[in-house]
Image (cartoon, rainbow, N blue to C red):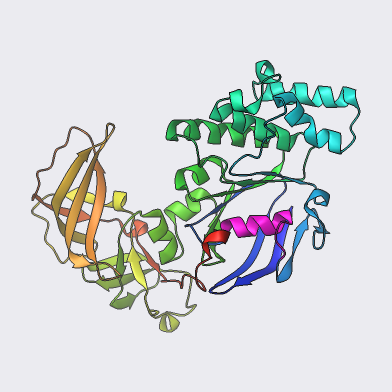
Amino acid sequence: MLEIRALRKSWPGFDLSVDLRLGEGEIGVILGPSGSGKSTLLRIIAGLDAPDGGAVFLGGRNLGGLPPEKRALGMVFQDLALFSHLSVRRNMEYGLRMLRMPRARREETVRELARSFSMEKLLDRRPNSLSGGEQQRTALARTLAPGPALVLLDEPLSSLDPFLRRRLRIEIADRLREAGVTALHVTHDIDEAFAIADTVFLMDGGRIVESGSAEELYERPRSAFTARFFGRGPLLLAEGLAVEDETIGVRTKLGIFRCPRPERGAETQAFSLGRGDCLFFPSEAARILGSECAQGEANIFHARVAATTFAGRYRRVALDCESMDSRGGALRLELEFPPYRRPKIGERLVLQVPEERCALLTEEPSGAGREEEDHA
C-alpha cells in the first residue's frame, strides 16, 4: 500500500500539501490541470525531489531519506528514457543486471515479459527502430522486470496520436493488473484517467480536491471545481434555499430546482447556503418536454438552439439559456441528440431535469497558487 502523510513542498507562489492512500495492487490516477502539482508529487514519491515535510510510506516502510534506487519502485517517464544503444532485450534486462540476477532467471523473466507484451520478435531491435507503441511497451516491460512494489507513470502517452493512446492505455492497465503491481499514473487527460483508474485523485493548486472511483467523481461530484473540470453541465449560483426533510429547493436565475439534500447540517434549521454554493446538473440529464409546458415549475427551464454538430453516433446541440452561470458568463448547455433529430437554429425548447440528477455543490477554493512551469 502507498500512503502519503501530510506531504509538503513549497516554491514562491506555490504550495503542495497532500495526503493520499492507494491500496495494494490498485491503479491510482492523479488527474488535474497543468501546474496543479501532479508531476512534482510523483518526483517526491520517486525520491527525485525532497519534500519540506511529511512522509511517504510504501508497504509500511518510510521512504524518507532513501535514494531512488533503494525505494523498490519503477518509473516510466514522459520521454521513456530508453537506452538507444541497447537492444530491447538489454533494455528489459537492465534492472535485472543491477540486481545481479543470475543469467538463467534474467532470460526467463525477459521471455515471459516479451510474451505478455507481444514483443518476442522485437527483442533484438533497438529503440530507434520501433514504433511509438512498441517503445511504450519496452519502457513498461523494463520497469516491471525487477518486480517493483510501485510503478509511477508520468504522462507516458502524451506524445502519441489519439488512436494509439486509446489502444495503449487499456493495454498498459491490463499489463499492470496482470502483474498485480500498485501503480500511480499522472495525466491531464480525463478519458485516459477514466479508462485505467481504480481510484482517481483530482488535483488543483497543490491539493487533492476530491478522490474516488471515476464513476463517483463523474456522476456525483462533491465540489463545483470537480463538476467544472469535467465540463459536464451548468453551475448556477444559488440565490435562495427552501429546506424539507429529504429534498431542498434551490432558487437560481434559471428557475427553482429541487434536489436531494446534501450531507451537511444535521438539523433542518442548521442547514443554510454557503458563499458561492451552486446548483449543478449534468447536461445529458436534461429531457425535452412538449412546448405546452409552462415555465416557472420546479426543474423546468426554456432554452434556444444555438448550434448543432453532427458527431456520428449522436448530434451535439448547443443551447443558450436566459441566465448567467456561477462566474457571470452566459449559460450554454450542450446536449446529445440522436443523429436523426435535427433541431433548427433558434428553435425554442422546454427542458426538465430530474430531481435526483441535481446537486447543491460548494465552490471550493482552488488552492494556494499555481506551480511554476518547471514543476508542472
- Check the image and report above or below for 243 versus 91: below
On the image, the x and y values in percent for residue 105 come to: 87, 26
Quadrant for the C terminus in the image: bottom right
**Residue lying farthest top?**
121
* Left or right, residue 228 beside residue 297: right
Residue 13: % across, % down: 53, 74
Coordinates of residue 3 in the picture (x, y in percent): 72, 59
In this picture, residue 11 sits left or right of residue 6: left
> Which residue is rendered at x = 19% and y = 53% of the image?
319
Is 284 within the magenta?
A: no
Q: Nearer the viewer, residue 250 or 155?
A: 155
Picture residue at 30% right of the left edge, 70% below the top: 327
Q: Nearer the viewer, residue 183 or 125?
A: 125
Q: Is residue 13 above or below residue 314?
A: below
Q: Which of the 4 quarters of the picture holds residue 5?
A: bottom right
Left or right: residue 51 compared with residue 294: right
Q: Which residue is nearer to you in this view: 80 or 312?
A: 80
Give the magenta part as a residue range. Answer: 38-50
Q: Is residue 49 above or below residue 157?
A: below
Q: Residue at x 23, y 36 (%)?
A: 338
Characterize the magenta stretch by its predominant secondary structure.
helix
